[in-house]
Image (cartoon, rainbow, N blue to C red):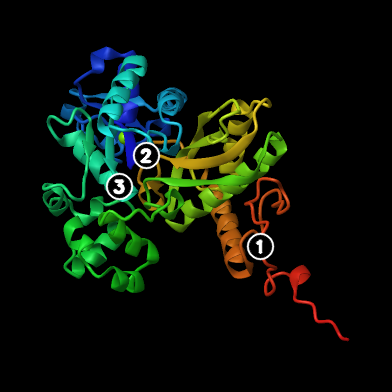
Amino acid sequence: MIGLIDCNNFYASCERVFNPELEGKPIGILSNNDGCVIARSNELKPLVPMAMPAFKIPPHIKKQITLLSSNYELYGDMSQRVFSIVQDYIIDTELYSIDEAFLHLQHQRNPVEYCRNLRKIIRQSTGIPVCVGIAPTRTLAKIANHIAKKKVGSQGVYYLDPNASDFIEQLEQLPISEIWGIGRQLSAKLSNMGIRTAWQLRNFDAHFIGKQFSVVLERTILELRGIACIELEDIHTPKKNIMTSRSFGKATNNIDDLHDVIRLHASRGAEKLRTQQSLAQAILVFLRTNRFGEQQSQYHPSIVIPLLYPTNDTRHIITAAQEGVCRIFKEDYSYQKAGVMMLDIVDQNKRQLDFFSQTEDTETKTRSNQLMSTLDTINKKMGRNTISFGGINTNAQWNLKRDLLSQRYTTRWDELPVVKMM
Ligand SMILES: [Mg+2]
């Protein structure tokens, strides 16, 4: 059984913890330099659309609402507090974004009650409201979380059971665009084929979809049927969440190794931003000790580093990520996993309209764009990491465990097959 825990209106909730007067009122959080709205409380949602530049909000609405600058230091720390409680109760958890994590609940006899209790503890100790969706697969757990947030009487936790009588109804009500990993473009294509609801997609020929679209979408269909087959790394919902992380082949407590691996993740994250033409406003860096190593003391730190202005320039993202590692690293622990997330992603093209916020001067910006696009072109043509920042150490301990790897006969000069003449 898999759970998805998600903090409700996370940034707004963090602000309310320390300013209870804001409870029940419409609040909006602004991007760096107070450019546009990046997070909204429920009360603000009917009043102001997401990503609206602050200066465009009509004065009569501005009067009724509270706008705040983004306080990433606070949000990062509150996230760390919430998820350290979660990890105390459920050992096997995977952080998915600043305010979400997947929970492996196979050891809980009554997962619904267990999570309701966890929810109370989190609210009591941090002030942050959370909801949990529970289901046999990640895709369904995401859907269950949406239901938990809306359904009266769910007490913040909902179990979506594929065998229950309301399962069909729940999926029939859900537009495909709400399904994990299905972005706007994909839902438009599916919609043209007459697939509009999660229930219709669930019943479509999965093999056909796999051939027409992608293996991941084929797996999404299986997941909707209750068959777990999607890993965290498989899904990259455009715009919302970019995470690059990996477990190491061998644990390490060497900060140079961690800098290497974080640099690699930061570069990949920046590359993904550029591919989908977007910019990040902050990044989250995390480290983890081995959660299955029961003998070892555990340390799962994370930190949010704001970027000076929204960017997808690898150099800025690496610098921020390296700073993050320095601030959370403690040498007494052996780390098994590290990752970087891009936060509060905005559309690169819409961004230019937001002339009130501070951006790089045009010349620097143009040069940065040229450098990055040259980098991407070369790496696309000649192979990943042909050009990288600081070099990639392929022998480092953190590389994937691949002791049983056969030689890369066709792509490496030093691994070519050898022919011996007798
Ligand atoms: Mg949330």
Q: In which quarter of the image is the C terminus?
A: bottom right
The percent position of residue 26, horizontal first and vertical second, equals 21, 25
Front position among marks 2 and 1: 2
| First in sequence: mark 3 vs mark 2 | 2
CA distance separating discs 3 and 1: 33 Å
| First in sequence: mark 2 vs mark 1 | 2
| First in sequence: mark 3 vs mark 1 | 3
Residue at which label 2 appears: 106
The percent position of residue 246, horizontal first and vertical second, equals 55, 47
Amino acid at circle 3: Pro
Residue at which label 3 appears: 136
Side (left or right) of 279 relative to 411:
left
Q: Which image quadrant for residue 132? A: top left
At x 68% / y 71%, what residue is drawn? Answer: 411
Residue at which label 1 appears: 405
Against 381, residue 293 (above or below) is above
